[in-house]
Amino acid sequence: MGTLETFDRLLAEIHRRGLKLIVDLVCGHTSDNHPWFAESRRSKQAGRADWYVWADPASDGTAPNNWLSVFGGPAWTWDPRRRQYYLHHFLSAQPALNLRNPAVVAELLGTARFWLERGVDGFRLDAVDFLMHDPQLRANPPLGPGPSGFPAKPFGLQQHIHDMAHADTAGLLGKLRAVTDEYGGRVLLGELSSQPGAGRRIDRYTGQGGLHSAYTLDLPKQPFGARTLYSALMAAGTGAATCWSFSNHDVERAASRWKPLGADPRRFAALLALLFCCLPGTLCLYQGEELGLPQAELDLDDLRDPFGMAFWPEFPGRDGCRTPMPWIGGARHGGFTDAEKSWLPVPDLHRALAADRQEMDLGSTLNVWRRCLALRRQLPDLRQGGLSEVDEEGEVLAFARGGRLVAVFNLSNAPADYVLPPGRYTPVETPLPAGTAEMAADGGGVTLTLPPLGALLATRES
């Protein structure tokens, strides 16, 4: 991954441009090749014997309980040296750290200080829900198959009430926050799972002395529509502590996953950009989303993701959203690297959407995103205004920001009507493609007619 000297140069250049750099801090596990784990697995009397989660087998030799790995199979692997099982929520090569051990926590806090001293602006905390679990190692109750039968990934067949999201998580986050606050102006951003109750966990983890903000994998895994986004906004409360993410490195890209049947890709990408920039709280824009990149379709031989290789073809893995960023359409590997072979291939469709090809097209998805982000910076209500009046009707989603700014979105590929409360509305110019919303006032309010994938931003005077 390079050297510390390279990292320091990167950080200096980022700061020189007025930007900030957050690095990923993985607190829940290490590699099974880590020196800590090599010592821990040596024997039960080793110096770091309880730095990882070890447990004796059940009386019949099976795993200590029924916990499952997210990536398939049991969450426990037998180690013949210790004659115990070790816990891993993900790959067996990622043994779980024992975060109830003060020495382990001290090492993690020391790691955080190392990077903070180097000048990083904060941390994105990986897999927060998996940091702490039931110390009694009680079994999870079954959830059972759904209406369509057993899922491809058996992790979905349990209620995950003991193996993750333990109440003690907040205490650990508080220790990390205390270290971060020593340096001033730094931030903690948490990644939460898609398990039920993610909104409540954001509230719990971002309470006083916890994370500054958190995002959940739940929203990107839901079907696109007004009901989904309405539920997400209602769960977010004021939205101040929520970090919104439509795409990330673990889910199919939104341009493919959410696009309504028959919708124009550029028009849909523009709607997503405006909707995204109107949400309260923090925004996390995944690389390539500003280009409108669709999910890459890869062959089995191209895959690098162990998750995808294990579940192919029912689940093709996550590599389709992890392909290199296409900077220069005509360059080898899209200008991402001059190496002989890139880690993952760059699809031809992504070359056509490369940054250099969109740069000079004022109507491109890249430039629409730029104008939407500029609009957010220009309007105080979008930057800091509270969230209120959240509503959904059919495929129309509506909400207010800061009390005066009203946002209405037609999430379908067909025209839609929506009735606004009585008042005087002044439209705000938005960068959406051709086709504008029309307003007609009557005694019962203002009837708004929205074009397919259309939207209205307006200031309201009552």
Image: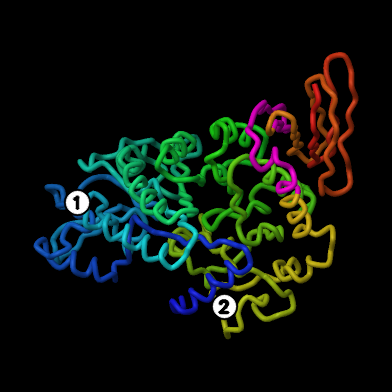
x, y percentage for residue 313?
A: 52, 59
Give the CA distance from mark 1 to mark 2.
42 Å
**Total numbered labels placed on residues in the image:** 2
Tell me the residue at 64%/40% (across/down): 384
Tell me the residue at 36%/53% (across/down): 179
Can see residue 214? yes
| Residue at mark 1 | 62
* Residue at the farthest left position: 45
Report the disc number at residue 375: none
Where residue 397 sits, quadrant-wise, is top right
Magenta stretch holds residue 397: yes
Q: Is residue 95 above or below residue 219?
A: below
**Segment colored magenta:** 375-400
**Contact check, label 1 and label 2, Cβ < 8 Å:** no
Which is nearer the eye, 294 or 384? 384
Tell me the residue at 69%/72% (across/down): 327
| Residue at mark 2 | 342
Magenta stretch holds residue 176: no
